[in-house]
Structures are given as C-alpha cells and as structure tokens.
C-alpha cells in the first residue's frame, strides 16, 4: 500500500509541476492589481469580438488548460491500471497458494 501512496504522490507532483511549467501562478495580489489598473467598470460587450482583437489579459490560455486536463486524465488512468494490476496480482498469488494447499492436503 505504501508504494501506491508513493505513486499517488509522484503523480500529484508531476501534475503540479506541469501546471507550474505551463503558466505563472496567479496570486490574489496580481488579480487585485489588474482590477485596479483597469479603472472603472467597462460596459458589457454586446457584440462578437475575435480573440485576436482582445487585450492579452482577457485571452484564456486554452492550450495550457487542455494540456493540464490531459495530464490529469492520463495520470488518473495510469493510477487506475496500476491499482487493478496490483490487485489482480494479489488474487493470483492467493489462488496459487490455495491450489498448492489443496494439492498438499489431497482434497482436490
């Protein structure tokens, strides 16, 4: 069970490092400073504006979010496969031990 915990910790570290590598962390100070620099509230936009015409602070980092989502899903899938394979191995060893016990006692 401790190896499973180590695997989970390693995957969490991998996901955290991937998220850090793909973009700077957002802190409350940055958000407040950005809100103050924008000044008074702007009117709500009622028409379509292409993303190329938006200021950089209003563009979503879609590639970073997509990559982070794929990393998370693949890590979860890997952990699930490792977990199932370990449990199948335990069951297989238990069946082999029980078969050996049956052969030894002659109750087969």
Image (tube, rainbow, N blue to C red):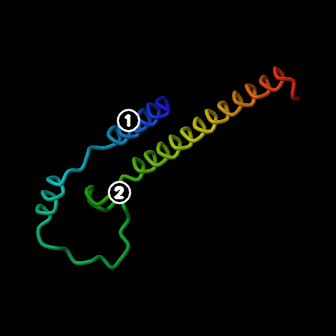
Q: Nearer the viewer, residue 16 or 96?
A: 96
**Position of residue 4 measured from the top left corner of the image (x, y, whole percent):** 49, 33
Q: Which residue is mark 2?
A: 60
Q: Is residue 78 left or right of residue 46?
A: right
Q: Which residue is mark 1?
A: 13
**Position of residue 77 measured from the top left corner of the image (x, y, whole percent):** 56, 43
Q: Nearer the viewer, residue 30 or 42?
A: 30
* Image quadrant assignment for residue 89: top right
Residue that appears at 58% across and 37% down? 83
Q: Which is more foreground, mark 2 or mark 1? A: 1
Near mark 1 (Cα within 10 A), the count class, few <14, some 14-19 or many ≥20, is few
Most extreme residue toward the top, as rendered? 104
Q: Is residue 48 above or below residue 11?
A: below
Looking at the figure, which quarter contains the C terminus? top right
Total numbered circles: 2
Q: Is residue 40 left or right of residue 86?
A: left
Q: Is residue 37 above or below residue 88?
A: below
């Amino acid at each position: 069970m401790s190896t499973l915990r180590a695997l989970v910790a390693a995957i969490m570290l991998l996901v955290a490092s991937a998220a850090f590598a793909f973009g700077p962390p957002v802190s409350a100070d940055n958000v407040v400073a950005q809100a103050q620099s924008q000044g008074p509230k702007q009117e709500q936009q009622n028409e379509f504006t292409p993303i190329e015409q938006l200021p950089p602070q209003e563009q979503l980092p879609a590639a970073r979010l997509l990559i982070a989502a794929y990393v998370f899903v693949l890590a979860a899938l890997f952990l699930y496969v490792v977990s199932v394979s370990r449990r199948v191995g335990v069951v297989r060893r238990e069946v082999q031990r029980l078969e050996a016990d049956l052969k030894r006692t002659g109750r087969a």
